[in-house]
Structures are given as C-alpha cells and as structure tokens.
Amino acid sequence: MQKFDTFSGVAAPLQIDNVDTDRIIPARFLKTIKRSGLGTALLYPLRYHADGSERPDFVLNQPRYRKAGILIAGENFGCGSSREHAPWALLDFGIRCVIAESFADIFYNNCFKNGILPVVLPKSEIARLTECAERGANAVFTIDLAKQEITDPDGRTLTFEIDPFRKHCLLNGLDDIGLTLEKAPAIATYEQAARQTQPWLFK
Amino acid sequence: MSKPLTLFDKIWNHHVVDRQKDGTCLIYVDLHLIHEVTSPQAFEGLRSAGRPVRRPDLTLAVADHNVPTTDRRFGITDPESLLQVETLGQNCAAFGIRYFDMGDIRQGIVHIVGPEQGLTQPGMTIVCGDSHTSTHGAFGALAFGIGTSEVEHVLATQTLIQRPASNMRVTVSGRRGKGVAAKDLILGIIGQIGTAGGTGHVIEFAGQAVAELSMEGRMTMCNMSIEAGARAGLIAPDEKTFAYLLGRPMAPKAGAWEMALAYWKTLPSDPGAIYESEVTLDAGAIAPQVTWGTSPQDVAAIDGTVPDPADQADPRRREAMERALSYMGLAPGMNLRDIHIDTVFIGSCTNARIEDLRAAAAVVKNRHVADSVRALVVPGSGLVKNQAEAEGLDRIFIDAGFEWREPGCSMCLAMNADKLKPGERCASTSNRNFEGRQGPGGRTHLMSPEMAAAAALAGRLADVRELV
Ligand code: SF4
C-alpha cells in the first residue's frame, strides 16, 4: 500500500450529503477483475449526462478542479454498498484525502486499506475549508498526517483526530495481512480451543 | 455477579484472538462468503504474495450478481460478466474453496444460500464482501460487509482487524397490522432514525413484533440494517431459529447439534445489559411503507403524500429533496397512490425467500397484472425456486402475467441484463433506491412483496390492505 505522510493539493468541494457508493462508482463499472482504471467513472452520475458527455457545471469537470487531490464532502459520505471500487476510483482519479462531516463505516475502513486518508471535521470547519477551496487551483491545502494537521491556503492550520493504529499503518504504508500473520501463533491457539468447544466448526 | 452483556458483546468477546492496548482487536471469522464481484482482486493479492487460504472449509463461494436470470443454456453472454464468474470458479478450484456454480441447484443470492444451507448459525462471526451480509444477523450471528482488502485478509488469516461497535437496541413493541410486513417495520425504522442513524453501532432488534416474525421476516429486517448505517443487525436466537436450522444440510449434525444448541442458548442479551442507544416503535402504528425518493430514509406510509421540500428548514436537506423529486419525476403533495409504475421487481436478498413469494402470490392469485406493467419474480436461490414450483406458486405468478426467472441478484443492482430504462419507474422489493441503482435513470420505489404485488395489479402504487 502507498503510504500517506504529507500531501499537498487542490481541494474540490462536493456539497452533497449521503453520497452513496453507487454514485461514487455505479454497478456497471464493477465488472472488472482489476483495481485500476476506475477513475474515469468516478462519481459518474454527477459527472456525466446520460449520453456520456460531461456536465460542465459539476465540480470535477471545472478546469480548476480537474487535478484535485482532496475532496471535501458532507455528511455520511460513502454510504451503501461495501464496494472497495469506490476508494479505488477515487485513488485512480488522484484523490488521496477525503474530508467530510461523517463517513459510513465500511467506506471509512476501505480508505485506510488503499492509502487514502479520511478526515472527519465539524460542519463549521468544513464550511471554512469549502470557502477556501472555492478559490480553485491556486488554493493549495497541505495535510500532515504525523502532526494531524491541515494547513489551508491562507496558512491557517487546524487539527483532526485519527485512530493511532490506523495512523501508524497509513504513515508507514503497512500491509495489514503481514502484520496479522505475525500473530499466527495466537490464531492457532484460538483455533485449538475452538476445536474443543465448537467442534462442529471443524471438518 | 459479572457485568450483564449484550448478544453483541458475547459474540465479540468469544471471537477476540488478540487485543491491542488501544482497543483494536483481531477477531476470528467463522464463515466467509464470497461472490464474483468483490473477490477477484483479493485472490490476485493472495497469488502475488504466495499466500494460501487459511480455512477453505469455512469459506463458501457463489456467483450471484452477474448471472443471467433467463434461460441459462447459453451461459453468460456479456464478456465482462463471464470473465468475473469464470475467474471465481478458477480461484475456488485453485484455492480449494466450495463453489456453487450457476448449474448447481443450490446457487442463488449469497445471503439466501448461507441460511438455507444451515451454514449461518447463532453466535458465529460471518463476513462477506457485500454490505447486506447483515442479513445473517437474523440468526444471532455477528455478520457484516467488508471491502475487498479485508476479503483478502480473511482469506489469508481467517481474522479481521476491528474495533468494537457500540450497542443500539431497536424495540418494536405490539403487533403488526393486517398487510404489514417485516419490510414495513424496517423501512419505518429507517424513516425514523435515518440512513446514518446506526453508524458505528450494531443494532439489536427486539420486542414482540420482532419475536413474532418468521426467520424470513427477521432476515428482511437485518438485511436492511445497513440502510440505517449500522455495522450489523442482530436478533436473539430462539426456538424459531433452532427449528429453522434443524436438519439443514450444513447445520451441526446429531451429537454436535446438542452441544451447539446448548451454546446458542447462552447467547441472548442478559437482563440489564447496557445499550448506548435505544429506539422504540409501536408496530401497530406502522402502515405499509413505500419510498418516494432516492434514499431508503425517503419513506412514507402508502396513504400519505409526496413531501414538500419547502417545508424543510435545513437548506442542504431541502436541496437533496428537490434533487430526489426531480430525479424521481414527482411533485410535492401528490398522493403516493397516484404514482403510476412501469415495472415490478420481486426479488433480492431482502425479499426473495419462499415466504416472500408466498405472500406476493397470495395477493395476485386469480388476478392479473395491469396491462402497462412488466412484472418479474426472481427467486433468491435454485432451492427457493424449486420449493415455489412444488407449491404451484410459479403457475400463480405466470397466470397473473409475471415473468418467472432463474435465481440471482438481477434487477436489484442491474449488473446483468435485467435493468430499468431511463425514466422507467419500478415497484421493487429490493433494498436500495439510489439514483441509477436499477439501471441508469431508473426510478425505484421500495416496498414489501405484498405491496409490490398490489402495485403490479393496480399499475400504480397501491395499498395492499384493500386487497387482503
Ligand atoms: S440482491 Fe442486491 S443487495 Fe442483495 S447481494 Fe445481490 S446485489 Fe446485493
């Protein structure tokens, strides 16, 4: 996994609540056996007309946000389907950080597995960041995960909360599976006990 | 005396393999269900790291999202769908995983297959790369959806890294009225607490109305707990649960059965257990529900009207409602019963079990679908389909003008050929009315199988209470 330590980029404001993962990446784009190449379909129904042409007014279609690396969203971002294609599509587009008032659980989890930093901030802070982001391509935000700080284009900083273990994994780009396999003896001990108490779970 | 525990606490504690100082746990997974859409990248990851599957015996695969529901003799024609399904078959063969392929009578929607086979059992931890894994909570199993990276993690280690959830209890007291189904209860709950109401929580459903539900009804409720934002839904196992499981092909057999039963009986929440959050509803006050918008929380009783965004104080909520109504092609103040429909879909992991088909068939028996309506029934599994045919339900549906299909996810998410055309309006027993969920531009109204059947007959949203 790509690690996340510091990141600077333009932020696209997406002022919509309850953006579900069907909107982030509709089902017809899930017929893939790869993780890559989903960026063009990111937020498809918001980004494109039914005939496939771009909606020029949509934020990611505006020239100043085409290279956005940060997305500023509303409440309950990523609700619905568990599809990890949602963070894959964000990443493929170039988004490394999503800032929102709140996230749905599975999507939030999936971000960390893909080197995307999800940041939860209160409504008032989101409103302030949105105002800055509206200035477009010259408004660069910098995120420092080690310090848990976002610096806005005016040089103001604000801090955010994050689970220490997840922070550690993201900072170092750690592979969860590798970490867990170090605990293989504990897993084997668990299985041995379960074989006695719940033999019906073993063939 | 030790601290009273909830059902969730008990299952969680039982499965902790390792606990870090910050509270992050490694929990053991008792059953891992996989399907073709969210697993290929996980297997690819295993291959490139040279890792085996730790417990293939606790893993079951089934193809459901992409499979055709019409004549299957010609296989899958869409090349991308075909590749996904074939890849699943190859991965299962390579890693030694049981696989119900399209030709297997046991094939069906993964969340219908698990319980049907008796694989889903009380006290288990169950995961699947699919958010509606919450369905299995109806058996008192802790079941939740995971992403593909986590699928790979479970394949490799049979564990998951998780933080414990908070406990929430939703008590539905009293009794359901005539024509009111489990679907109406859960839609009513989502209408009340919202699609983020359960975030970070596991919801335990309790109360007389829940206890009175069949296992099928309980699955419908737990299925949609994800639509309330919950990590999982749970219902305490009871005699109905045990009776449902007894004798199923993959349930514990004689000898082990008694041992399992003794364990399962210890699972229900202790009196005095603490829930961080409590919600109560009166089942008697819940009428048949239909959604009018593009989120499951956009729901109202069938005798109501389309709400007016102008009544919303919060500007963002107002905008979202306006967008939803414009997408749905509806005007504020319209009677819900005046909304005409083009299509009816009876299916999905929410409502494609035998009881759902019986309920819909009872409504359409000796009646006929409105001329303007295309109606389909997609059974949840090959075994559900067989059972329905043995009971003559297929004849009732076909005589009423329904199409009788092969099992799969079908028009629930429109990955196969079954989809709405832009602007088409559907009365659907599925679980999500998101924009484009049933096909780009398609308009979805969620409801119970009984209500979808009534809508098929009337050609518009209708109150099933007038028919039963
Ligand atoms: S029926 Fe629908 S909700 Fe259920 S697993 Fe299939 S696609 Fe998902």
Image (cartoon, rainbow, N blue to C red):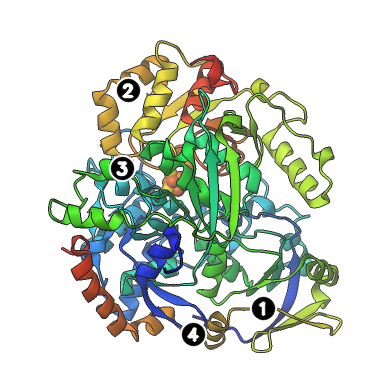
The image shows residue A27, relative to residue B124, as above or below, that is above
Q: CA distance from mark 4 to mark 1?
A: 18 Å
User: Which quadrant holds residue A116?
Assistant: bottom right
Instruction: State whether discs 4 and 3 lie on one chain.
Output: yes
Q: Secondary structure at mark 1?
A: loop
Depth check: A196 or A2 in front? A196
The answer to whether the residue labelled 4 contacts the one labelled 3, judged by CB atoms less than 8 Å apart, is no
Q: CA distance from mark 4 to mark 2?
A: 57 Å
What is the crowding at mark 4: few (fewer than 14 residues within 10 Å), some, or many (at least 20)? few
Counting residues from the start of the chain, the first of labels 4 and 3 encountered is: 4
Foreground mark, 3 or 1, reads 3
Q: Which residue is mark 4?
A: B21
Kindly identify the amino acid type of the residue bearing the numbered disc 1.
Glu
| Left or right for B447, reference B378 | right
Measuring 63% from the left and 57% from the top, which residue is drawn there?
A43
Foreground mark, 4 or 1, reads 4
Q: Secondary structure at mark 4?
A: loop
Q: What chain does badge 1 belong to?
A: A
| Left or right for B62, reference B339 | left
User: Which quadrant holds residue B384?
Assistant: top left
The answer to whether the residue labelled 2 contacts the one labelled 3, judged by CB atoms less than 8 Å apart, is no
Instruction: State whether discs 1 and 2 lie on one chain.
Output: no
Q: What chain does badge 3 belong to?
A: B
Q: Which residue is mark 1?
A: A161
Q: Which residue is mark 2?
A: B394
